[in-house]
Image: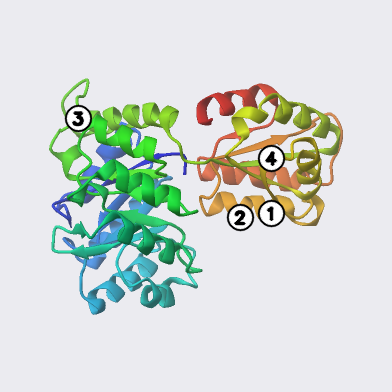
C-alpha cells in the first residue's frame, strides 16, 4: 500500500444504518478502499455492502471491534462468508488465523492492549511496539491495525516506533480527523489510514457540502501525504529480453530514488539489476517463462504491489504475450499502476518515490 485512505462507513465504532446508500456517494467522491465494522448492521446487510463495494471495483474491509473471544471469532467467520479483501482489528490473532488462514483475505490485527467501546489503546510505547513485533512474526498476519489516535501519549512517536519496528504494513486508525493527523501518519511510515466518523461529520475543509465532497477532500490530503510518506514501496520490475538494457538504464538513472524501497523482479531481470545496482533491496521470483509473471500477478491480486514496471517490446513476438495480457488485466482490475516503457515508469517514479 502506498499510503492509502480507507473510508469506514462507521460512526462511534458502529456501521451506520444507511451505509448502503452512502456507498454511491463515496464512489462519487473517488474512494476505492471502503470498510465497515462488525457491529451495527445484521450480517445480511453487511453482505450487501461487501457485494456493492466489489461490484464497483473497490477493496472491502471489515474491522473487528468486538472484545470477547466468541464475538471476535464470529466476526472472523463473517469476514470469510462476506468474502472481504481485508480483516482489520481484533486481539486474538492465533485463534482468528485458524479461521482465515485458508481464505485469501489479508489480516491486520490490533497491536497493543485494547479496551472499551469505542476502543482505546493502552500501555507504554515500548510494550505496544513489542506487541507489534510479535504479531508480524505470525505467518497469517499480513500487517497491523494501530489505534494511534486512541492512545493517550505521544502519538507521532508511537506511530514511528511501530512502523520502524516491523516489516509489514501498518494502518493507522481511530479518530483521524484533521490534515495534521493525516500528514503525521504519512511521515511515520504508515501504509494507510482510516477515517469514519470525521468524514460523516464534515470535519475536513471541502470545496462544497456533502459526503462526496468530504471524500474528495480527504483523497486530496492523501495525495499530499503520499509525497511525504516514508513507507517503503513495493515495485515490480520485469522486461522482455530485448528491453532489459532499457530497464537496466532506467534503474541506474533512478537508483538513488529506489534505495530503501522493495523491488520484486522476475528471475533474469532480477539478476541483471542485482549486478548493476547491488545497493538496492531486491527479491527475485522465478524467470518469467517459468512462472515469474504469474507470481507477479498473484502479488497484484493480493494488493502487495504499489506499481508494476514491465518494459515490453511490441515489435517482436514473445512466448509470454499471454502472461503480459494477464498482468495487464490484473493491474486494471486491482487499480495497480502499470508502466510498459520508460516515460510511464518516470511518471510512477515521480508519483510514488
- Whether residues under marks 1 and 3 lie with C-beta atoms below 8 angstroms apart, the answer is no
- Ranked by sequence position, the earlier of labels 2 and 3 is 3
Rendered residue at 61%/55% (across/down):
298
- Whether residues under marks 1 and 2 lie with C-beta atoms below 8 angstroms apart, the answer is yes
Residue labelled with disc 1: 294
* Left or right of 303, for residue 323: right
Tag 3's secondary structure? Answer: loop
- Ranked by sequence position, the earlier of labels 1 and 4 is 4
Residue 167: give x, y in percent of width and height: 50, 53
Tag 2's secondary structure? Answer: helix
Any part of residue 50 in sight:
no
Quadrant where the C terminus lies?
A: top right
Nearer to the camera, 27 or 178 = 178
Residue 204, which numbered label? 3
- Whether residues under marks 2 and 3 lie with C-beta atoms below 8 angstroms apart, the answer is no
Rendered residue at 69%/40% (across/down):
237
Tag 4's secondary structure? Answer: strand
Residue 151: give x, y in percent of width and height: 20, 51
Of labels 1 and 4, the one closer to you: 4
Residue labelled with disc 2: 298
Residue 204: give x, y in percent of width and height: 19, 30
Give the number of callouts: 4
Q: Is residue 59 above or below residue 328?
A: below
> From mark 1 to mark 3, how far is it between C-alphas?
42 Å
Residue labelled with disc 4: 237
Rendered residue at 80%/56% (across/down):
290
> From mark 1 to mark 4, how far is it between C-alphas?
13 Å
- Ranked by sequence position, the earlier of labels 4 and 3 is 3
Amino acid at each position: 500500500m502506498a499510503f492509502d485512505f480507507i473510508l469506514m462507513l462507521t460512526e462511534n465504532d458502529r456501521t451506520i444504518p444507511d451505509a448502503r446508500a452512502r456507498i454511491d456517494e463515496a464512489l462519487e467522491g473517488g474512494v476505492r478502499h471502503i470498510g465497515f465494522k462488525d457491529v451495527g448492521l445484521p450480517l445480511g446487510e453487511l453482505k450487501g455492502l461487501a457485494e456493492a463495494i466489489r461490484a464497483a471495483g473497490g477493496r472491502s474491509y471489515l474491522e473487528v471491534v468486538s472484545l470477547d473471544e466468541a464475538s471476535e471469532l464470529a466476526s472472523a467467520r463473517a469476514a470469510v462468508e462476506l468474502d472481504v479483501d481485508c480483516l482489520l482489528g481484533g486481539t486474538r490473532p492465533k485463534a482468528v488465523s485458524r479461521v482465515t488462514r485458508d481464505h485469501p483475505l489479508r489480516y491486520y490485527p490490533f497491536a497493543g492492549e485494547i479496551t472499551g467501546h469505542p476502543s482505546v489503546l493502552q500501555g507504554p510505547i515500548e510494550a505496544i511496539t513489542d506487541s507489534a513485533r510479535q504479531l508480524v512474526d505470525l505467518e497469517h498476519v499480513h500487517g497491523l491495525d494501530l489505534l494511534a489516535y486512541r492512545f493517550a501519549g505521544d502519538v507521532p512517536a508511537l506511530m514511528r516506533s511501530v512502523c520502524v519496528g516491523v516489516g509489514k504494513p501498518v494502518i493507522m486508525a481511530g479518530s483521524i480527523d484533521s490534515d495534521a493527523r493525516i500528514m503525521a501518519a504519512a511521515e511515520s511510515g504508515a501504509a494507510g489510514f482510516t477515517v469514519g466518523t470525521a468524514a460523516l461529520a464534515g470535519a475536513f475543509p471541502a470545496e462544497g457540502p456533502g459526503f462526496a465532497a468530504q471524500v474528495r477532500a480527504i483523497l486530496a490530503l492523501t495525495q499530499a501525504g503520499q509525497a511525504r510518506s516514508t513507507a517503503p514501496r513495493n515495485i515490480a520490475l520485469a522486461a522482455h529480453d530485448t528491453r532489459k538494457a532499457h530497464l537496466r538504464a532506467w534503474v541506474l538513472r533512478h537508483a538513488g530514488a529506489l534505495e530503501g524501497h522493495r523491488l520484486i523482479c522476475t528471475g533474469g531481470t532480477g539478476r541483471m539489476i542485482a549486478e548493476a545496482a547491488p545497493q538496492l533491496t531486491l527479491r527475485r521470483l522465478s524467470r518469467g517463462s517459468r512462472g515469474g509473471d504469474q507470481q507477479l500477478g498473484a502479488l497484484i491480486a493480493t494488493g502487495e504491489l504499489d506499481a508494476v514496471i514491465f518494459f515490453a517490446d511490441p515489435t517482436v513476438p514473445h512466448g509470454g504475450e499471454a502472461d503480459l495480457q494477464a498482468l495487464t488485466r490484473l493491474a486494471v482490475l486491482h487499480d495497480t499502476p502499470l508502466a510498459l516503457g520508460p516515460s510511464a515508469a518516470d511518471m510512477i517514479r515521480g508519483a510514488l518515490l
